[in-house]
Amino acid sequence: MYLEITGKEDHVMIEVCNEHPFIHQSEWRKFLQRGYSTKGKGRGLGLYHLKKLMAKYDGDILIQNKLIDERPYFSIAVKIQ
């Protein structure tokens, strides 16, 4: 797991990355749906609530695959103005 928090004059960015094989972009939207989880029933609320908070406070969610030290990671970041 990798965590980075950066700040600029106009925004703060919080990014969390997990080492994971490439996840196709068409799958990303599912992660923000209420109840979606690859870990079983009774889960899948955290990113759903994050999406609602970002909508309320005019923040952005950025999702991507990236390489860190030549290893594949899946990244979710929030950008708050």
Image (spheres, rainbow, N blue to C red):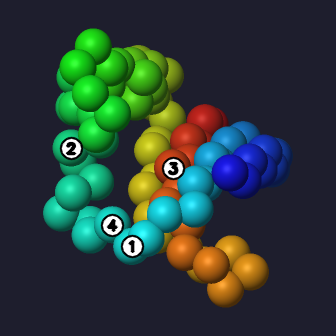
Check disc 3: other Cα within 10 Å, few if <14, some if 14-19, many if 20+: some
24 to the left or right of 51: left
What residue is drawn where x is 56% and y is 48%? 77
Badge 3 or badge 1: first in the primary sequence: 1
Q: Which mark is residue 23?
A: 4
Against 68, residue 63 (above or below) is above
Disc 1: which residue = 22
The C terminus: image quadrant = top right
Residue 78: image location, x then y, percent: 56, 42
Disc 3: which residue = 76
Q: Which mark is residue 31?
A: none
Select label 4 or label 3 by which is in front: 4
**Nearer-the-camera pick, 26 or 10:** 26
- Residues under numbered marks 3 and 1 in contact, where contact means CB atoms less than 8 Å apart: no
Residue 47: image location, x then y, percent: 40, 30
- Count how many numbered circles sit on residues in the image: 4
Q: CA distance from mark 2 to mark 4?
A: 11 Å
Against 63, residue 21 (above or below) is below
Select label 3 or label 1 by which is in front: 1
Badge 3 or badge 2: first in the primary sequence: 2
Check disc 1: other Cα within 10 Å, few if <14, some if 14-19, many if 20+: few
What residue is drawn where x is 31% and y is 25%? 44
What residue is drawn where x is 55% and y is 75%? 72
Q: Secondary structure at mark 2?
A: helix
Q: Secondary structure at mark 4?
A: loop
What residue is drawn where x is 74% and y is 48%? 3
Q: Disc 3 marks which amino acid?
A: Ile
Disc 2: which residue = 30
Residue 51: image location, x then y, percent: 37, 29
Q: Disc 1 marks which amino acid?
A: Phe
Q: Secondary structure at mark 1?
A: loop
